[in-house]
Image: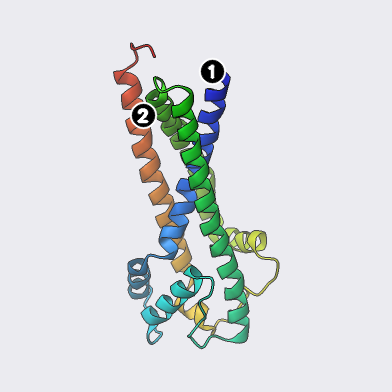
């Protein structure tokens, strides 16, 4: 029984860490206020930029949605790939969420008395894992351009992401936009992971003399 609980705690911790990372990606993708802030900050000189982003977000969010903006043929082909990636991201988040809930349900089923302790252990280890991933991922800022290219090579099977300087996507989303997006994702993961770590450590210290 104890081995089962340990396995469930480890699996749930890893899945919860992955969920935290992926959910922060999703939050940035669909945060309209972030785009508006970036347009002003980067002095994006594209008419109706916010409307174009709204069209893009709607296109990426819904499988059957079509683009209304007049992008070039190459841009449209690239956005098909981006949409496929975002849809996989959403599906993965949903699947992980279900598995995390199942882990919690099994922990509760196997041993109600130790459920809170196991939950705190999951929170602690998932926070540690997330912070470790964060530290490693932060190395991308040493050479963001190379990291950005490597990201595309990893997740796309073609070179459609290589666009001319006058392409609408390039004008709306300069490199600084993606740097700021990465920083925001890192901050989001870091804040939640530190909060989870703080809560779990506080609970462990407050209950260090108790037996379960």
Of 76 and 173, nearer the camera is 76
Q: Secondary structure at mark 2?
A: helix
| Residue 8 shown left or right of residue 81 in the figure | left
> Is residue 34 depicted above or below 117 in this figure?
below
Please state the total of marks drawn on the protein image: 2
> Is residue 40 depicted above or below 137 in this figure?
below
CA distance for labels 1 and 2? 21 Å
Looking at the rendered image, the disc whose residue lies closer to the viewer, 1 or 2, is 1
| Residue 133 shown left or right of residue 34 in the figure | right
Determine the residue positioned at 40% across, 56% down: 184
Q: Earlier in the sequence, mark 1 or mark 2?
A: 1
Mark 2: few/some/many CA within 10 Å (<14, 14-19, 20+):
many
Determine the residue positioned at 57% across, 75% down: 79
Q: Secondary structure at mark 1?
A: helix
Position in image of residue 153 (x %, y %): 66, 62
Q: How was this image coloured?
A: rainbow
Residue picked out by circle 2: 200
Of 44 and 60, nearer the camera is 60
Of 68 and 159, nearer the camera is 68
Position in image of residue 108 (x %, y %): 44, 28
**Which label belongs to residue 2?**
1
> Is residue 205 depicted above or below 10 in this figure?
above
Determine the residue positioned at 62% across, 85% down: 73
């Amino acid at each position: 029984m104890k081995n089962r609980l340990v396995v469930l705690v480890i699996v749930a911790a890893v899945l919860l860490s992955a969920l935290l990372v992926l959910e922060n990606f999703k939050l940035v993708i669909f945060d309209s206020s972030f785009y508006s802030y970036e347009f002003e900050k980067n002095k994006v000189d594209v008419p109706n930029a916010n409307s174009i982003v709204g069209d893009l977000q709607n296109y990426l969010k819904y499988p059957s949605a079509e683009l209304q903006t007049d992008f070039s043929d190459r841009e449209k082909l690239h956005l098909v790939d981006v949409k496929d990636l975002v849809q996989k991201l959403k599906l993965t988040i949903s699947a992980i969420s279900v598995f995390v809930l199942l882990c919690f349900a099994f922990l509760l089923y196997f041993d109600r008395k130790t459920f809170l302790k196991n939950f705190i252990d999951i929170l602690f280890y998932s926070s540690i894992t997330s912070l470790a991933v964060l530290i490693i991922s932060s190395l991308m800022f040493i050479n963001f351009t190379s990291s950005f290219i490597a990201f595309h090579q990893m997740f796309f099977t073609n070179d459609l992401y290589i666009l001319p300087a006058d392409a609408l996507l390039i004008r709306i989303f300069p490199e600084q936009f993606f740097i700021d997006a990465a920083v925001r994702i890192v901050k989001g993961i870091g804040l939640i992971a530190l909060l989870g770590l703080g809560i779990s450590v506080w609970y462990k210290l407050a209950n260090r003399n108790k037996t379960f």
